[in-house]
Amino acid sequence: MTNSRTPSRRGTISKALPDNISEAYMQKYICNVCGYIYDPEKGDPVSGIPAGTPFEQLPPDWVCPLCGVDRDSFDPITD
Amino acid sequence: MTSARKITDNIYWVGAVDWHRQTFDELIPLSEGTSYNAYLVQGSERTALIDAVDPPFVPVLLDRLDQLGVKQLDYIVSNHSEQDHSGGIPMVLDRFPGAQVLCTPKAKGILRDLLPIAEPRIQTVEDGERVPLGGRSLMFFHMPWVHWPETMVTYLEEDQILFSCDLFGSHLATSALFSSQAATILPAMKRYYAEIMMPFRIPISKYLDRLGPIALKLIAPSHGPIHDKPEQVLDIYRSWTAAEPGNSVVVAYVSMHGSVQQMAERLIEALLARNVSVDPFNLAALDLGNFATALIDARTLVFASPTVLGGAHPNAVYGAYLTNALRPRARYGALLGSYSWGTKITAQLQDLLSALKLEMLGTVLAKGAPRPAEFAAIDQLADAIAARHNQ
């Protein structure tokens, strides 16, 4: 189980982002209204948001792709 | 003459009953009319109006205030910016030049987008903030998304009254001031929850937790009678907002020449034979309120449609779109359909229902009229559904 050759999640992230982007930038956010989770690793293809887009860099008019509420209704996932 | 109705000392209902309104938002049928509840709260030093009324009824509201001899109004609390409550605020502000609107920061922007209210006349309040009236004080709990992003409720701690605005409301025109005297309050509340609040089940369940420890004698919503048994209201809302869905199957169908109707009826009979409760709806003559109410209790949703111009019947599209938007708790789905020379109804209806993340239990399509093979497939589908009910 010490095989360091196995591609890690961290390795996947570093491909999509410059090296200086911190782990905190890849914070997931949950919609308080419908439970949709915005995962920066996946982006939001439905809304044309490419994989690797941090929540903080979503356009101001971005809304939850499931229920349509605005960005203010999202909280970071703490667990 | 239009009199205010006394709730307790110096607290009055000053709203309006809209006995004969037939639809809301040009969408929701109002089978029992509605009311727009505004409340007057008088402290020893200041007076507050809790919400206003739909604009055509402002003269009624002002008349009730006149009957009470109200000469000065200090605050108009705007719990919710939708115009059936806020639309009358500009006229009330004109009448009482010293009055300030109290609302959430989010509501301030929405109110100013919707209504001609000068910026200095709006004062925002924080979550948990108290505004003293003298001898009693208003306390505000921000509760966004019941059912807009700016909503809050107002708690009168000394009197243990919660002014909840649309939350816990009902579209019910009645002469009863209190809901214990209104015979049809429960179905009216359920229907209202289904039509207005169901998409916001998750935040509402959190707000019920927040309200749980708060002492309540009355819940005074903005539509329908005042709840004089608040614990019953919180309990019924807990059951509607719980994560676990009910145990019924909604079968929503539309049929042009009878094929889909035969399939839907076969499924309904097969489910009944397996002791599964069914709520059938003909989408060609849909009562939105009855349909939405049934969605509260649904564990499985079945849509059934013929093929029209290559796709689903527009009424089936409407039903699926509406259901997706109302976001019921249902976990399972299935489709029935008919076609003659090609169809894309399966992908189309599944796409329309995508927000619900249903586990699809099966699709049965008949080429032309359904035959024994399709009926057998429907019976199998009924087995699959029944296995997930009756547990």
Image: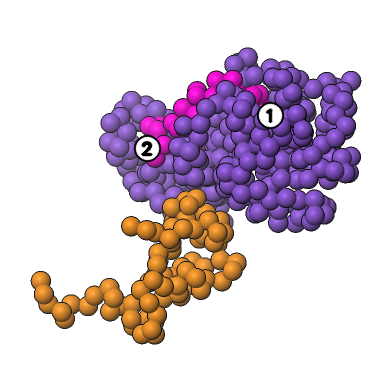
Chain colours: A orange, B purple
Q: Chain of mark 1?
A: B
Q: Which amino acid, mark 2?
A: Glu
Give the camera-side residue of A11 and B373: A11
Q: Which amino acid, mark 1?
A: Gly
- Magenta-colored stretch includes residue B55: no
Residue B313 in view? no
| Residue in view at x 56 percent, y 66 percent | A62
Q: Are marks 1 and 2 on the same chain?
A: yes
* Mark pair 1, 2: CA separation: 44 Å
Range drawn in magenta: B224-252
- Residue B280, position as x, y percentages in the image: 48, 32
* Label 1 environment density (alpha carbons within 10 Å; few <14, some 14–19, many ≥20): few
Mark seen at residue B244:
2
| Residue indicated by mark 1 | B135
**In which quadrant will I find the C terminus of chain B?**
top left
| Residue in view at x 43 percent, y 52 percent | A35
Q: Which mark lies nearer to you, 1 or 2?
A: 1
Question: First in sequence: mark 1 or mark 2?
Answer: 1
A74 vs A13: above or below:
above
- Residue B188, position as x, y percentages in the image: 60, 26
